[in-house]
Image: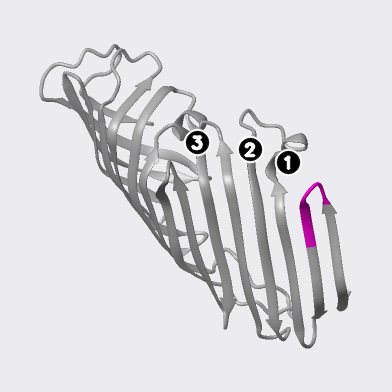
């Protein structure tokens, strides 16, 4: 429809409430709000099958004002007691606001009573409800992400080769460029690390890394991983094709004493 008017719509179920009110004129004035309160995320586990169930309570709102050609959008999402095993976040918040062609993003999350995640940045993507949407992949982004003492437990969910993960991750990530061809800089290190990989006899006690992605190429400037009786060092580069690493060439080195890991030797690895 080109015009939508809602006087006051309220829907609820077991403490979960959805509200909508206002006017949406796709060629004229807009004054519309939509809010959700106490939406239980475990409802989605019934329709989305995954090994890790999601729990938590979500509240959000979106307010759209101005007119179709130059809308102003303010929105916020808050999730409390977010649980994606084995990691729990006491609170997660994301603000997404839009005006004059620019989206402004602000996000924070706390874990174990500490602020573990921080996001801020901008996205250049103009909206005109009376016109077709522009190409999203060529839109410019400028994001900064910081992880501060994020529990390493979440790595077990992402990487099956990790059999045990204790400790914390600190990282800073900068993303610029466009969605289709971003420039990404990553700096990461661990604290109180005890990371075990399948088939490796000793856990990693410290990991440090710096990497860049530019022009669809990955450059690993350094990766330094420590075990009880030695260290691994790696560096290299490769191309990224369809979200996969290809044409890579990495050099590995064992330093500071013997490290007895079957199948791991000094040298280089490539896909030729």
Q: Nearer the viewer, residue 145 or 138?
A: 145
Q: Secondary structure at mark 1?
A: helix
The stretch drawn in magenta includes residue 96 = no
- Left or right: 35 as drawn, with respect to 13: left
Rendered position, 101 above or below 83: below
Query: Is residue 33 placed above or below 261 in the rendered structure?
Result: below
Q: Which mark is residue 54?
A: 2
Alpha carbon distance from label 2 to label 3: 10 Å
**Gap in Å between the C-alphas at discs 3 and 1?**
18 Å
Quadrant housing the C terminus: top left
Residue pointed to by mark 3: 87
User: Is residue 17 part of the magenta span, yes or no?
Assistant: yes
Callout 1 touching callout 2 (CB < 8 Å): yes
- First in sequence, mark 1 or 2: give its number: 1
Comes first in the chain, label 2 or label 3 = 2
Q: At 64% across and 39% down in the image, what residue appears? A: 55
Q: Main secondary structure of the magenta part?
A: strand
In-image side of 178 versus 254 (left or right): right
The local secondary structure at tag 2 comes to strand
Residue 209 vs residue 155: left or right?
A: left
The image quadrant of residue 250 is top left
**x, y percentage for residue 240?**
44, 46
| Residue found 33% across the figure and 48% down from its top | 171
Q: Is residue 216 visible?
A: no
Secondary structure at numbered mark 3: strand
Residue 193 showing in the rendered view: yes
**What residue appears at the point 55 percent right and 60 percent down from the top-left corner?**
94
| Residue bearing mark 1 | 44
Find the residue positioned furthest to the front: 15
Q: Earlier in the sequence, mark 3 or mark 1?
A: 1
Range shown magenta: 13-18
Circle 2: is it few (<14), some (14-19), or many (20+) Cα within 10 Å? some
């Amino acid at each position: 429809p080109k015009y939508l008017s809602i006087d006051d719509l309220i829907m609820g179920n077991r403490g979960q409430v959805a509200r909508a009110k206002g006017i949406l004129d796709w060629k004229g004035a807009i004054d519309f709000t939509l809010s959700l309160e106490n939406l239980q995320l475990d409802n989605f586990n019934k329709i989305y099958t995954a090994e890790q169930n999601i729990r938590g309570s979500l509240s959000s709102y979106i307010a759209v004002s101005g007119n179709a050609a130059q809308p102003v959008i303010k929105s916020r999402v808050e999730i409390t007691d977010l649980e994606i095993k084995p990691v729990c976040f006491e609170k997660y918040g994301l603000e997404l606001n839009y005006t004059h062609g620019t989206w402004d993003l602000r996000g924070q999350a706390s874990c174990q009573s500490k602020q573990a995640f921080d996001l801020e940045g901008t996205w250049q993507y103009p909206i005109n409800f009376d016109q077709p949407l522009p190409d999203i992949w060529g839109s410019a982004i400028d994001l900064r992400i910081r992880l501060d003492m994020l529990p390493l437990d979440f790595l077990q969910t992402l990487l099956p080769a990790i059999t045990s993960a204790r400790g914390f991750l600190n990282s800073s990530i900068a993303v610029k460029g466009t969605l289709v061809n971003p420039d990404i800089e990553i700096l990461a290190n661990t604290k109180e690390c005890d990371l075990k990989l399948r088939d490796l006899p000793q856990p990693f006690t410290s990991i440090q890394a710096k990497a860049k992605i530019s022009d669809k190429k990955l450059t690993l400037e350094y990766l330094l991983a420590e075990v009880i009786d030695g260290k691994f060092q790696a560096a290299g580069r490769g191309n990224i094709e369809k979200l996969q690493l290809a044409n890579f060439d990495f050099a590995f080195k064992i330093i500071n004493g013997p490290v007895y890991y079957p199948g791991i030797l000094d040298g280089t690895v490539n896909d030729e």
